[in-house]
Amino acid sequence: RARLASDDAGGMSRYLSLVLLGALAACGGKKTYSSLGEFTRAQEEEGFVVLGMFDDSWPATIVEERESRDEISFTRANGTAHRYPGYAGYTLKVVRLKSKDGGEGIIVFRSKERE
């Protein structure tokens, strides 16, 4: 029988540590993009298209990402509130980015397909 790293207590502990670190990196890792094109291509691959954009500057790192169905709202750092109603059946996404110079960018997406 083949021996796995998880067959002994020490191996199992190391294995679980690696799995946990991988999961944390996947969920909590802040992804940085070098350009708007790189970022929007990544979103298109996930099934989203751009609806609106505010103050984009690159490179930028995702600091917040929220999804909602049918409509979405958010407030910019300067206090301006925005709302995107009227997208029944679509998933909407707001992504807040922070550029290298500290500026805030927000990009609003909707799913390509109605769900």
Image (cartoon, rainbow, N blue to C red):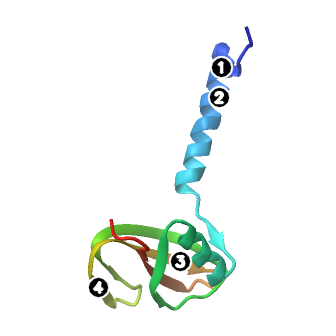
* Secondary element type, mark 3: strand
Which residue position is annotated with label 1? 6
Q: How far apart are the alpha carbons under marks 1 and 4?
A: 50 Å
Which residue position is annotated with label 2? 15
Circle 2: residue type: Tyr
Which residue position is annotated with label 4? 83
Q: How far apart are the alpha carbons under marks 3 and 1?
A: 40 Å
Circle 1: residue type: Ser
Q: Of label 1 and label 2, which has the lower sequence position? A: 1
Q: How far apart are the alpha carbons under marks 1 and 2?
A: 6 Å
Which residue position is annotated with label 3? 97
Residue plotted at (54% across, 71% down):
43
The answer to whether 5 appears left or right of 26 in the picture is: right
Q: Residues within 10 Å of mark 4 (few under 14, many from 20)?
A: few
Q: Residues within 10 Å of mark 1 (few under 14, many from 20)?
A: few
Residue plotted at (45% across, 68% down):
65
- Picture layout, residue 77 above or below residue 39: below
* Secondary element type, mark 2: helix
CB under 8 Å between callouts 1 and 2?
yes
Q: Of label 2 and label 3, which has the lower sequence position? A: 2
Q: Position of residue 38 (x, y in %)?
A: 66, 77
In which quarter of the view is residue 17 placed? Answer: top right
